[in-house]
Image (cartoon, rainbow, N blue to C red):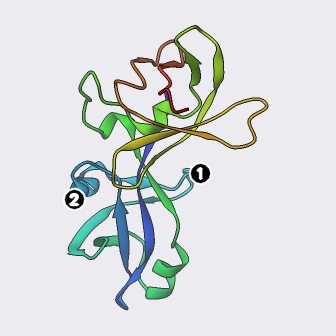
Amino acid sequence: MTERVCVGAIAGAFGVKGEVRLKSFTADPTAIAGYAPLFTEDGKRSFGVTLTGVIPNGLSARLTGVRSREEAEALKGTQLFADRARLPALEDDEFYHADLIGLSVRDAGGTELGRVVSVQNHGAGDMIEVMGPGMKQSLMLPFTRAVVPTVDLAGRRLVVDLPEEI
């Protein structure tokens, strides 16, 4: 399991005094501030977070060390990571997306289909993207108990029951 989990991203500048537009990936979007310090993916920078408001498609926030619109705009697209230890414990049937990426995907008969390359959510629930040898395009599967009855993090695998239409 990864030491840090992606909890948000900077979507650009907000205003002229260094605030950023923050997109939160947490269940409660405003909880992101409580997981600070937040780190860049490479871990070279960290930020304290003070939320300043709720705006369309996200939050406005002040990040420590960001003082101008230009500095805020330069961070656009930066993903923000929190130490796993700062995140809440999950229920038995909940998983951090970061823990699913890279897992082996097998069908009920044990045949390996590929690996999880991403987890996406476009509003209708989580989808896992699976890519395997010889596949020309990835396979998108709903991440539901019916389709993915077994998640074995210790064994680094998912077992899927492929829908008939696939």
| 62 relative to 159 in the view: left or right | left
Residue beneath the point at 57% across and 8% down: 109
Residue beneath the point at 65% across and 17% down: 112
Q: CA distance from mark 2 to mark 1?
A: 24 Å
| 34 relative to 79 in the view: left or right | left
Residue beneath the point at 48% across and 14% down: 154
Name the spot of residue 162 as percent of width and height, x first.
50, 24
* SS at circle 1: loop
Q: Which is more toward the observer, 82 or 156?
A: 156
Q: Which is more toward the observer, 8 or 127?
A: 127
* SS at circle 2: helix
The residue that disc 2 covers is: 30
State which mark lies toward you, 2 or 1. 2
Q: Sort mark 1 into few (<14), some (14-19) or many (20+) by Cα contacts within 10 Å.
A: few
Q: Amino acid at mark 2?
A: Thr
Name the spot of residue 136 as percent of width and height, x first.
75, 41
The residue that disc 1 covers is: 42
Q: Is residue 60 above or below residue 139?
A: below
Q: Is residue 139 above or below residue 46?
A: above
Name the spot of residue 44 as percent of width and height, x first.
57, 55
Q: Sort mark 2 into few (<14), some (14-19) or many (20+) by Cα contacts within 10 Å.
A: some
